Each structure stands twice: as structure tokens, then as C-alpha cells.
Image (cartoon, grey):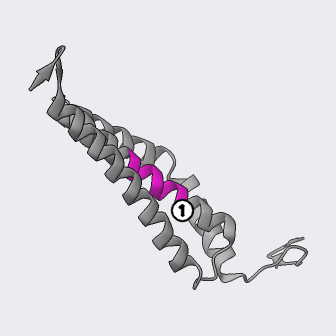
Amino acid sequence: MEIAGINIIQVAEVIITLAATYIIAKAVSRALEKIFEKTPFPEQIERGIVKISKYVVYIIGFFVIVSFLGFDLSSVIVGLGAFSIAISFATSTIIQNLVSGILVQADKAFQIGDEIKVLNFEG
């Protein structure tokens, strides 16, 4: 059914998908916040994980909407996959350091002001 060249069913699908994406993103963030209440992670890391999770839900919702509009996403998804692999190889050291930093903060083995000595280095 079309009115002025606009397919009403596609518009309804887009609106429903937008609403569902928003609701799912809220539910995921609330669930993660409840989980993080019981973990020793620093608040900054928790907020970062919640934000990234929301963005992932929004990106998935975007791809669903674009597919409803009739665009072929297979080549885009393959391209994004190849791009992601290239980025992960290029930033593997950075990612390792980031994960190590998160684990050190989660363990709370060191506090600001602590002095540590490794081999001949002290600080």
C-alpha cells in the first residue's frame, strides 16, 4: 500500500524497529548496570561497557532498518568484517594493553600513590 510513493508497510516496519531498538538498548544497559552492581569494576569501565553495548544494539537496529528498506547489505557486512580484521591486527598491542589495564583496575592490586619496583625501575 503506497501513498504519494511511500510504502506504508515499510514506514511501519522502520518505526517499529526504531522503537524495538530503543527498548532493547535500554534493557541491555539496565541489565548490565545491575550486573555491574555486584562486580568490583571501576565505574569508568562499567560506563564504557554500557555505552559500547548500546552502540552495538543501535548499529544492529540500523542494519535491520536498512534491510527493511530493500538494500543488500551482504557486501557491506563482508567489507566491515575485512576492515575489522585489519583493524584488530593493526591495534592488537593497544587492545592487549587496554585489556591488561582493565584487569589491573578490576583486581585493584594497585592504588594511586602506590610505589612499585620492577627490575631496576621504581616509581
Quarter of the picture containing the C terminus is bottom right
Residue 46: which quarter of the image? bottom right
Quarter of the picture containing the N terminus is top left
20 and 103: which is toward the camera: 20
When the figure is inspected, residue 75 is found, relative to residue 15, above or below; the finding is: above
Judged from this view, the residue extending furthest toward the left is 1
When the figure is inspected, residue 99 is found, relative to residue 109, above or below; the finding is: above
When the figure is inspected, residue 84 is found, relative to residue 5, above or below; the finding is: below
Residue 53 lies in magenta, yes or no? yes
The magenta stretch is 50-58
Residue 41: x %, y % from top left: 63, 76
Residue 37: which quarter of the image? bottom right
Q: Amino acid at mark 1?
A: Ile
Residue 95: x %, y % from top left: 54, 56
Residue 23: x %, y % from top left: 39, 57
- Look at mark 1 in the image and give the residue it sits on: 49
Crowd tier of the residue under label 1, counting other residues whose Cα lies within 10 Å: few below 14, some 14–19, many 20 or above? some
Q: Secondary structure at mark 1?
A: helix
Q: How many numbered discs?
A: 1
Q: Residue at x 54, y 62 (%)?
A: 49
